[in-house]
Amino acid sequence: MQMGKVYLVGAGPGGHGLITQRALECIGKAKVLVYDRLLDENLLAIAPPDAEQIYVGKASSQHTLTQDGINQLLVDKAKEGKTVVRLKGGDPFVFGRGGEEAEVLLENGILFEIVPGITSAISVPAYAGIPVTHRGLASSFSVITGHEDPTKETSSINWKNLAHATDTLVFLMGLKNLPDIVAKLVEHGKSPDTPVGVIKDGTWPSQAVLTGTLRNIVTKVHENKFTSPVITIVGDVVSMREKLQWFDNRPLSGKRILVTRSRSQASALSQLLVERGAKPVELSAIDIQMNDDYSKLDEAISNIKRYDWLVFTSVNGVGAFWKRLRELKLDSRALSGLKVGAIGPATAEALADKSITADYVPEVYTGAGVIAGLKAHNVADQRFLLPRADIADSEIVDGIAGLGASVDEVTAYRTLPEIEAMAKARAMLAAGEIDVITFASSSTVSNLVTAFGGDQVNINGAKVACIGPKTGKTATTAGLNIDIMAGQATIPAMVAAIEEYYKKES
């Protein structure tokens, strides 16, 4: 059997997007993924569906597997001929024990590759607005493990020299040892008035920062009940935070926002939320499924020339329609001569990806907006095809018919409730772990209501944000108060409305 290969990969500090392109490529081809704690769990979804995922995370007092056990695991899986990705937080060679693992692989004749990651030693301070070097304040810095006990006789840290060797000291982890670290630095001549910053959950939406001095930082950490993981920065550069803090000043910093869109669409909303400092909690209320029977849609596509208009009311409809086009050995040329409508800009963009420019997008991105805009197009006696979801209401169909046109509505895809995800959402709401619920369609509201099994919908003070009036009406009927309403029925507009709400609250 041919020997496999092991990739020792740094995943960065965990914050959204702080991972290298090469690391993503490696995860994407892994047959075995051996991963640590303090990683962005979304990275695991990048691995192939059939990849074996093995958690080997270590906390200060709890190890799922010893380091020797991890070493042997990598060797065994590689000897099975598998592509193994050892995914580590930060950088493999900065207190990541990547060197030890590489040595073991070398001893066993196993091919390996090191994929560096962004170390938390520089990225976490940067996210706190603290540069590890700064002209006039610091021209050098040291990175020290905080795990070592500073009081043990055999300490490998030369505290006497360290106290004055570089301008900035960065201690990774070591919250438990912070009192001893402070004492050792002061004992060896560091001024008690030296600025100190302690950063918890650096680069994550839950990031929290305390600043003080060697004289009072231990007391502040205790009073604020800081818990691991933390990074401690010692030096004059900490004073720059007051000017340069940016990450925790964003409008939605730290807000936990429930994203109820389908899995395939959640990422776009989550990305916008992350950019504004929020922590999206993706628990899809709906599952988009293909039809069991496509005969009606296929018949409509095969006779597409009998229609004057093809109108899409969702991105999912575009995707399902083009999938059937391919199955029927057709492409966009089949739509020659038709006018194509889209309910809003996201749907129009999905059409553009198929090389189709929408002939009509209403000014108001709702069913009522579609009807109002079509009045100017003189559609009487024309024939429309609407490929839609199985649960779509009749508003648009009735409205077009009211304009004197005929409409063929065909099911392009099915929407089913995500029962397990919504049960988890209910539990998180009950525990007060959600600040805002986002509803991007009426079906997401209905499916959350279903999760309560007939009980009163208790969202425990969470704010409700809706993409538009129709979704808002469904939420109101369910007994929910609408706190935030998008100015337009688009995802960016809903995020902007959430942002504006919290600006007014602050």
Image (spheres, grey):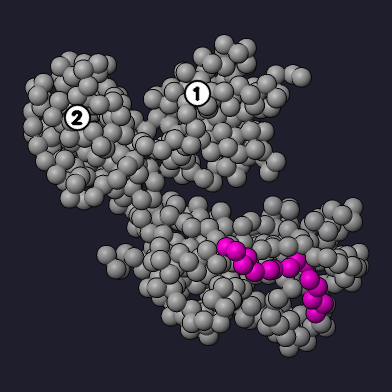
Res. 181 mark? 2
Q: Quadrant of the C terminus?
A: bottom left
Q: Kindly identify the amino acid type of the residue bearing the numbered disc 2.
A: Ile
Q: Quadrant of residue 418?
A: bottom right
Q: Is residue 313 above or below residue 27?
A: below
Horizontal and vertical percent position of residue 74 = 59, 25
Q: Are marks 1 and 2 in contact (CB under 8 Å)?
A: no
Q: Nearer the viewer, mark 1 or mark 2?
A: 1
Quick check: can you spot residue 494? Answer: no
Q: Quadrant of residue 343?
A: bottom right
Q: Is residue 469 above or below residue 291?
A: below
Q: Which residue is mark 1?
A: 68
Q: Quadrant of the N terminus?
A: top right
- Crowding at dot 1, Cα within 10 Å, few <14 / some 14-19 / many 20+, comes out as few
Magenta region includes residue 188: no
Quick check: can you spot residue 402? Answer: yes
Q: Nearer the viewer, residue 80 or 321?
A: 80
Residue at coordinates 52% horizontally, 45% vertically from top-left?
Answer: 41
The span picked out in magenta is: 407-421
